C-alpha cells in the first residue's frame, strides 16, 4: 500500500523572494510540493520527502485513511525537527505493510539541505536513515534519499527518490514521488501527486509469504486548507499493486498538520 503523505508543510526557504501577495502576514505557507511528506507505504511512508529545512523549529503531520487495493488501513504520525543550520531530524511511527501491517513501527532519518532556492534557484536535500515499517522480520531497512523542489509563483513542484535495503541485503526497494500544486487564494492549495515503489532485484525467498510487491503506484488529487499554524490535509486517487497478481483500488487519506 502507498501511504503518500504527499501532503506536506512548506517552509518556503525562499519566502522573502517568493512571497505571495495573497498570503496574510504571520500565516506560514503550507505547500504540498515542498513540505514534509509522509512517505509512506503498503509501501511508501517516504513519499514526497521535503527538500527544505523546517521554517520553524518543527513540523508535525498525522495522516490516516484506507487503501482498497491492499484492503488495509493507513496511518502515520511524522515530525521534522530542525537540529542546527540546514540539518533536520525526521521521525515517524506508522503501520507497516504486508506481514508487518498489524503493528505500529518507527522510522528515523537525517536530512541535509544542500541548496536553497533563494540563492541557487532550487531547493535540494539528501539524507538517509533507518525504518522498521519495512522488512521488520529482517530487522528493518536502511535507506538513502534525495529531494528537489522549486516554486513558480503560485505553483510548486517537488520530486524525490529513495533507495532502501534490508540489513541482509537481499531485499531492495526504489521509491519515487512527484507532486505539483497551485495556491488558490489565502488558505487553499490544490494539486496532483504520483508516488511509486519498485522492487530492485530482491532475492529473499520469504517475499511471497510477506506479501511484498513487485511494484506499487498511486496517483490522485490532493488539497490543503490552512488556519494559522494549522492545516487540514486530504488526498484521494487510484492505487495499483502487483504481488502474486495485480490489485487495483482507491486510496483515501485525511489528516492534520502544524508548524511550531
Image (cartoon, rainbow, N blue to C red):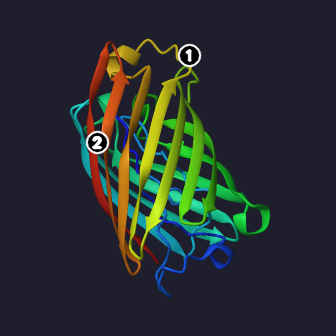
Circles 2 and 1 in contact, beta carbons < 8 Å: no
Q: Quadrant of residue 44?
A: top left
From the image, which quarter does the N terminus lie in? top left
In x, y percent, where is residue 93?
38, 52
Q: To which residue does mark 2 refer? A: 103
* Observer able to see residue 162: yes
Q: Quadrant of residue 200?
A: top right
| Nearer to me, 154 or 7 | 154
Q: CA distance from mark 2 to mark 1?
A: 27 Å
- Residue 14 is left or right of residue 34, and the answer is right
Q: Residue furthest bottom?
A: 25
Q: Position of residue 254 (x, y in %)?
A: 28, 56
For residue 84, above or below residue 32: below
Q: Residue, x 37% and y 38% (percent of image)? A: 2
Reading the chain from its start, which is encountered first: label 2 or label 1?
A: 2
Crowd around label 1: few <14 · some 14–19 · many ≥20 (10 Å): few
Q: Residues within 10 Å of mark 2 (few under 14, many from 20)?
A: few
Residue at the image position 26 percent from the left and 29 percent from the top = 69
Q: Nearer the viewer, mark 2 or mark 1?
A: 1
Amino acid at each position: 500500500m502507498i501511504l503518500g503523505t504527499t501532503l506536506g508543510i512548506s517552509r518556503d526557504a525562499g519566502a522573502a523572494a517568493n512571497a505571495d501577495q495573497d498570503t496574510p502576514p504571520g500565516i506560514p505557507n503550507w505547500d504540498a510540493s515542498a513540505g514534509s511528506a509522509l512517505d509512506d507505504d503498503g509501501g511508501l511512508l517516504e513519499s514526497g520527502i521535503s527538500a527544505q529545512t523546517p521554517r520553524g523549529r518543527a513540523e508535525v503531520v498525522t495522516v490516516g485513511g484506507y487503501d482498497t487495493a491492499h484492503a488495509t488501513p493507513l496511518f502515520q504520525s511524522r515530525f521534522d525537527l530542525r537540529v542546527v543550520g540546514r540539518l533536520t531530524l525526521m521521525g515517524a511511527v506508522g503501520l507497516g505493510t504486508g506481514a508487518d501491517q498489524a503493528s505500529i513501527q518507527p522510522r528515523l532519518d537525517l536530512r541535509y539541505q544542500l541548496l536553497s532556492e533563494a540563492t541557487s534557484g532550487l531547493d535540494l536535500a539528501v539524507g538517509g536513515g533507518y525504518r522498521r515499517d519495512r522488512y521488520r522480520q529482517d530487522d528493518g531497512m536502511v535507506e538513502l534519499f534525495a529531494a528537489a523542489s522549486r516554486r513558480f509563483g503560485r505553483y510548486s513542484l517537488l520530486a524525490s527518490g529513495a533507495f532502501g535495503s534490508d540489513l541482509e541485503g537481499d531485499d531492495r526497494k526504489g521509491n519515487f514521488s512527484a507532486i505539483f500544486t497551485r495556491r488558490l487564494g489565502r488558505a487553499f492549495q490544490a494539486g496532483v501527486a504520483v508516488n511509486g515503489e519498485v522492487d530492485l532485484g530482491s532475492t529473499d525467498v520469504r517475499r511471497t509469504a510477506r506479501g511484498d510487491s513487485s511494484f506499487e503506484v498511486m496517483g490522485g488529487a490532493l488539497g490543503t486548507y490552512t488556519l494559522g499554524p494549522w492545516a487540514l490535509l486530504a488526498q484521494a486517487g487510484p492505487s495499483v499493486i502487483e504481488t502474486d497478481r495485480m490489485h487495483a483500488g482507491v486510496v483515501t487519506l485525511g489528516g492534520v498538520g502544524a508548524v511550531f
